[in-house]
Amino acid sequence: MKNHKSATQWPLSKRPHLNSESALARMGDGEVLNARQNALLPLPPHLTQEMTSAAIAVIQNKLNLTPRQSEVLYWMAEGKTNEEISIILECSFFTVKSHAKAIFRLLQVDSRTAAAAFAHRAYAKEQS
């Protein structure tokens, strides 16, 4: 069995190069930006925090989750692992895992992807 390494585990000189498709992000209007263009226009920290808080509030209200479950689901939808979420929320890995199980049960889903889809749909409905 091969031992796969995450991008952060590779030395800089030996990291695999991203192909053009993985370095692209699609905007809502269909315009395609590459990762370099996207990095040139960072959002101010206060605006990013406001956007995160608004998204978490929408998830909480639309999906009837607790505030902490909403935070965990938001970060899951952002592609974070349980370990990364535990660092962000400053809590135990096992606490995040427990919240994830509760979220799966409440939303009646079996995967992180399905739970993330619920979060994205809830936020998309709020924006329309």
Image (cartoon, rainbow, N blue to C red):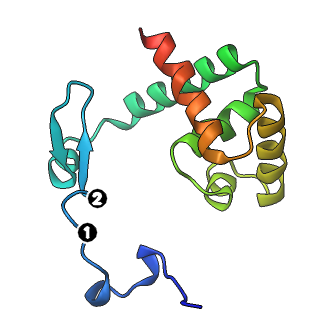
Q: Kindly identify the amino acid type of the residue bearing the numbered disc 2.
A: Ser
> Would you identify the image quadrant in which residue 109 lies?
top right
- Which residue is under mark 2? 22
Q: Are marks 2 and 1 in contact (CB under 8 Å)?
A: yes
Instruction: Judge from the rendering whether residue 101 lies leftward or rightward of residue 115; answer left or right.
Output: right
**Which one is in front, 66 or 112?**
112
Q: Position of residue 86 (x, y in %)?
A: 69, 55
Q: Quadrant of the N terminus?
A: bottom right
Q: Residues within 10 Å of mark 1 (few under 14, many from 20)?
A: few
Secondary element under disc 1, as helix, strand or loop, is loop
Image: 93 above or below 76: below
- Which residue is under mark 1? 18
Instruction: Judge from the rendering whether residue 34 lies leftward or rightward of residue 55; answer left or right.
Output: left
Secondary element under disc 2, as helix, strand or loop, is loop
The residue lying at 47 percent from left, 32 percent from top is: 49
Q: Position of residue 122 (x, y in %)?
A: 57, 20
Q: Kindly identify the amino acid type of the residue bearing the numbered disc 1.
A: Leu
